[in-house]
Image (cartoon, rainbow, N blue to C red):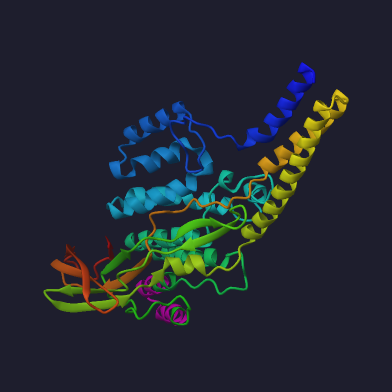
Amino acid sequence: MTRRQIGLAALVAAGLTIFSAGCAGAKHLSASGTEIPDEAWAAAEARVREEGIPPALELEVIGLYSEGRQNSVLHAMRAGLTAIRIGRFDLAKRFFDRAIPEVEALQEGAPQAERAKSVFVAEREKWFKGEPYERAALYFYRGLLYLRDQDFDNAAACFKRSQLQDLRGEDANIPSADWGGAEWGLALAALKQGRPEEAAAALARAAKFPSRQGDFPAPRAEQNLLLVVEAGQGPIKARGGRQGEALFYSELPLLIPKVEVRRSGALLARAAAAENLFFQASTRGARAADRILAGKADFTEGAGAAATVLGVAAVGTAISGQSDIAAGALGAAALGSALASASSRPETDVRRWDNLPHSIFLIGLTVPPGRNVLEVIGLDAAGRPAENQTFDFHAPEQPHAPLSLCFLRF
């Protein structure tokens, strides 16, 4: 066997394995697992400092500024929800308003949406737009912020968009557009605008949803405080199937299925969750993306097998001393099949809006002017107190006070 033949055989063998090698030593990795250039990370850090971003948001916002459009929606979603929880409603609106146009652009028909169907584009390399439940949650939280701003028209529009995103789930045979929390918010917005018929219609729809977790008080026009209680951890995405081409959800148990609110020991309200995000995530049925990914798995296996056969033939030709041209042709074909197999990576995308809660409780209250010390108690499945939080709410003195919004998390 000549040195040239040995070199050709080594080249073919290397070509068949090179695509399984990973990159090591990345200093900063994106949400997609790709390396972020040092200069991009440093520029993002400087921008975060310049803008005075709170420490709780720094890492997400650095990711938002350094990773480009690939993960911009994901980081904006996470940062927006964290901003709500630390009381920075201004930043929450800013980040959600950054995510929403991107989500709209990534719907069917946009160039990136078409690219996402390609068999040669890895799921994790596509621009993140979220699953239907994540997109619905984006509009839901934005609607809550519009309620706080007394912008009831835009609040209603967001709650309707929340339902529309849920309706856009990729399996039309499975019940969808059943976000009870969105209908509750729509009802409150309608009541604040003097439209009781619209509110009644929204609540009637919610009462029939399969997502309903139990009874929760209906909103009323005179309420001046909306208490939003988040509990538990949101859906966890995982891969399954022959090559990780299927998407599955897992659930951490919810330890607080009901919440009650008391003032000076007196019961003001008791409610089940208005929304269960695990239910919303896991009742979509088979997604179109899963079917595409299953096709990718078939393609990858076929291309990989062809690469192996051609590669073995090329090595055998080189070793046997046959034509270098023949060995080279077989080697090129093997490399082409390996390229196709490597380019068609079927693993489903498991990036997720990972600070979403498991369930959301919506409780409207009418409290008197001045200081109100409210106790929020999380009840376990047996109705026993499991957790509690106390907070002060200072209701405005003026009549017909605007709606205030308070977020708590268990």
Q: Nearer the viewer, residue 297 or 28?
A: 297
Q: Nearer the viewer, residue 161 or 339?
A: 339
Do we see residue 340 in this rendering? yes
Quarter placement of the C terminus: bottom left
Q: Is residue 336 above or below residue 321?
A: below
* Residue 147 horizontal/vertical position (percent): 35, 63
Farthest residue, direction top:
3
Residue at screen point 48% across, 29% down: 37
Q: Is residue 277 above or below residue 206?
A: above
Tell me, yes or no, whether the highlighted magenta stretch contains residue 203: yes
Residue at screen point 50% across, 33% down: 35
Residue range highlighted in magenta: 185-205
Residue at screen point 66% across, 41% down: 342
Image label count: 0
* Image quadrant assignment for residue 252: bottom left
* Image quadrant assignment for residue 138: bottom left
Do we see residue 221 in this rendering? no
Q: Would you say the magenta stretch is mainly helix, strand or loop?
A: helix
Quarter placement of the N terminus: top right
Q: Nearer the viewer, residue 4 or 237?
A: 4
* Residue 183 horizontal/vertical position (percent): 43, 73
